[in-house]
Image (tube, rainbow, N blue to C red):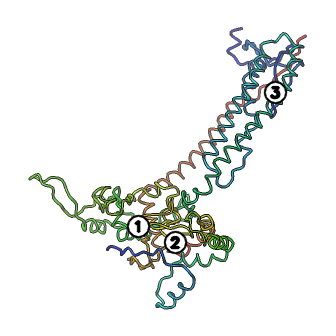
């Protein structure tokens, strides 16, 4: 059985969309524990998140294509990963 | 005299000798003091030469190079430090040792070659010491400057390219098979094989695994035979000289999706989906890396755009990977009813891949535990035996006998 290769790159992981999906479906809808933990770890990683958002604002006007926020993005996701990793496998079979 | 040489005497007689031109270094500094006092030398009848002269020549060379401040230790590793910076520092350090060591060894040589000129040597030497001190501080300054320049040059290129180039560092997950005596979760291996078969096998080969390897690990023999029988295998020439196809057997390898690498690249936009038989060993921190990669597809950061045909994954070196996100919730329905979330499938498939790369892990851990335990007992026994045998020599007494 071949999977349809749908492009999930542009799905946002914002809290609002997540909860809409959750409440629409029946109760046996699976919740991905990793996404859930990443959301719950957001308050712990507010500082790098704010740094990233500040960077986004700074480079908004730029059209040269050379400016990017990879550093702040990595810092934020590194913080989230460190928070999620010890807890994730407890939620999996 | 020859006979006494072959026996180690139980008591050694220490004789006083006159002042020798021994150069004695103070450890940790590059200054010298001339030992002008009468020096005690342990001399048995076997030794032709006083140990002082011979030993300190060798000792001085060693201690000089070790006493020179290690430049690389002065610079604390900073974020973004690269291999080129470290190499630059090590090069500088080697240079200093050569230059500084050469200067100091020259002085030593001159010193030792003129043993009879005690007083003029001493005055000459004290002037040399001052020169060496200023010279060494000059050498040190040069070294630090060189290190700084090397650091600056490499630092400018580090911060911009390094992060995306190396990929985001993956976290360490607490795998159930991580402990010193922990085995694989075989239920997870079974589910992982199912995920591989249904999701990954369309592009990735696993050409080093046979169906028979799965027996006893993830499936029973009958199950494995049934799985093998579902595939068609091309077999060797028959009596008429023709190749024929037959249903698979346990001894056959897992089927390959493409005939060769070129076909694989052609079907995947130039990118080759690597064989997964050894992938967790073939990538640094493989298990954590593969899990992070499979579950880490996210929107790219602001300012990064990925061209059509590639996808953004922060863990992939460079950030742009040809493989799209393959693990989606409920993509597979597990036989044992476990909810197939993205993280669950990722964990299971990585367990399967870990087993595929290291099937001997459980036996290896058992063997390792057993033999490390036994060898440490042997170590204790050997240490006791050595100390027992050496106790005779180590409890010798030395008698000081002054000869007038």
Calculate the distance from the C-alpha at mark 3 to the C-alpha at mark 2: 61 Å
Name the chain letter of the residue that bears numbered label 3: B
- Which residue is located at x 52 percent, y 51 percent? B368
Calculate the distance from the C-alpha at mark 1 to the C-alpha at mark 2: 16 Å
- Same subunit, labels 1 and 2: the answer reads yes
Query: Which residue has dot 3 on it?
Result: B132
Q: Badge 3: few (under 14), some or many (20 or more) residues near its Cα, within 10 Å?
A: many
Name the chain letter of the residue that bears numbered label 2: B
- Which residue is located at x 60 percent, y 57 percent? B160
Asked if the residue under mark 2 is in contact with the one under mark 1, i.e. CB atoms within 8 Å, the reply is: no
Res. B27 in view = yes
Q: Which mark is residue B79?
A: none
- Which residue is located at x 85 percent, y 14 percent? B17
Figure check: B148 above or below A68 = above
Res. B392 in view = no
Quadrant holding the C terminus of chain B: top right
Figure check: A8 above or below B374 = below
Ranked by sequence position, the earlier of labels 1 and 2 is 2
- Which residue is located at x 66 percent, y 44 percent? B150
Ranked by sequence position, the earlier of labels 3 and 1 is 3
Query: Which residue has dot 2 on it?
Result: B298
Residue B274 shown left or right of residue B35 in the figure = left
Figure check: B95 above or below B5 = below
Quadrant holding the N terminus of chain B: top right
Q: Which mark is residue B309?
A: 1
Figure check: B24 above or below B212 = above
Ranked by sequence position, the earlier of labels 3 and 2 is 3
Q: Badge 1: few (under 14), some or many (20 or more) residues near its Cα, within 10 Å?
A: few
- Residue B124 placement: quadrant: top right
């Amino acid at each position: 059985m071949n999977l349809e290769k749908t492009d999930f790159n542009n799905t946002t992981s914002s809290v609002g969309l997540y909860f809409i999906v959750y409440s629409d479906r029946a109760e046996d809808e699976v919740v991905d524990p990793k996404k859930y933990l990443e959301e719950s770890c957001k308050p712990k990683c507010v500082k790098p998140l704010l740094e990233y958002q500040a960077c986004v604002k700074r480079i908004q006007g730029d059209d040269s294509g050379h400016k990017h926020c990879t550093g702040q993005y990595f810092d934020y996701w590194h913080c989230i990963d460190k928070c999620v990793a010890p807890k994730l496998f407890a939620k999996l079979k | 005299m020859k006979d006494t040489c072959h026996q180690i005497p139980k008591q050694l007689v220490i004789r006083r000798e006159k002042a020798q031109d021994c150069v004695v270094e103070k450890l940790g500094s590059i200054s010298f003091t001339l030992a002008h006092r009468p020096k005690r030398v342990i001399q048995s009848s076997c030794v032709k030469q006083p140990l002082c002269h011979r030993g300190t020549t060798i000792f001085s060379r060693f201690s000089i190079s070790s006493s020179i401040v290690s430049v690389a230790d002065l610079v604390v590793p900073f974020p973004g430090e690269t291999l080129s910076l470290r190499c630059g520092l090590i090069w500088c350090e080697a240079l200093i040792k050569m230059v500084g060591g050469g200067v100091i060894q020259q002085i030593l040589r001159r010193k030792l070659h003129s043993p009879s000129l005690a007083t003029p040597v001493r005055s000459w030497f004290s002037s040399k010491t001052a020169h060496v001190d200023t010279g060494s501080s000059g050498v040190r300054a040069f070294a630090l400057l060189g290190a700084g320049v090397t650091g600056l040059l490499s630092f400018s290129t580090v911060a911009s390219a390094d992060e995306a180039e190396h990929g985001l560092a993956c976290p360490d997950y607490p795998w159930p098979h991580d402990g010193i005596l922990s085995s694989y979760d075989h239920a997870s291996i079974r589910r992982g094989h199912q995920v591989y078969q249904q999701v990954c096998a369309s592009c990735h080969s696993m050409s080093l695994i046979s169906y028979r390897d799965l027996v006893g690990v993830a499936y029973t023999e009958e199950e494995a035979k049934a799985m093998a029988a579902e595939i068609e295998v091309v077999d060797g020439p028959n009596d008429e000289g023709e190749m024929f196809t037959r249903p698979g057997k346990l001894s056959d390898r897992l089927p390959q999706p493409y005939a060769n690498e070129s076909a694989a690249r052609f079907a995947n936009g130039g990118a080759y989906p690597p064989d997964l038989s050894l992938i967790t060993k073939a990538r640094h921190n493989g298990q954590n890396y593969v899990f992070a990669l499979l579950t880490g597809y996210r929107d790219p950061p602001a300012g990064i755009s990925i061209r059509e045909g590639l996808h953004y994954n922060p863990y992939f070196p460079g950030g742009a990977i040809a493989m799209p996100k393959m693990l989606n919730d409920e993509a597979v329905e597990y036989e044992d009813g476990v909810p197939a979330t993205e993280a669950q499938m990722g964990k299971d498939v990585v367990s399967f891949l870990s087993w595929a790369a290291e099937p001997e892990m459980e036996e290896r851990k058992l063997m390792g535990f057993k033999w490390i335990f036994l060898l440490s007992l042997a170590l204790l026994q050997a240490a006791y035996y050595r100390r027992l045998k050496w106790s005779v020599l180590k409890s010798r007494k030395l008698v000081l006998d002054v000869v007038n």
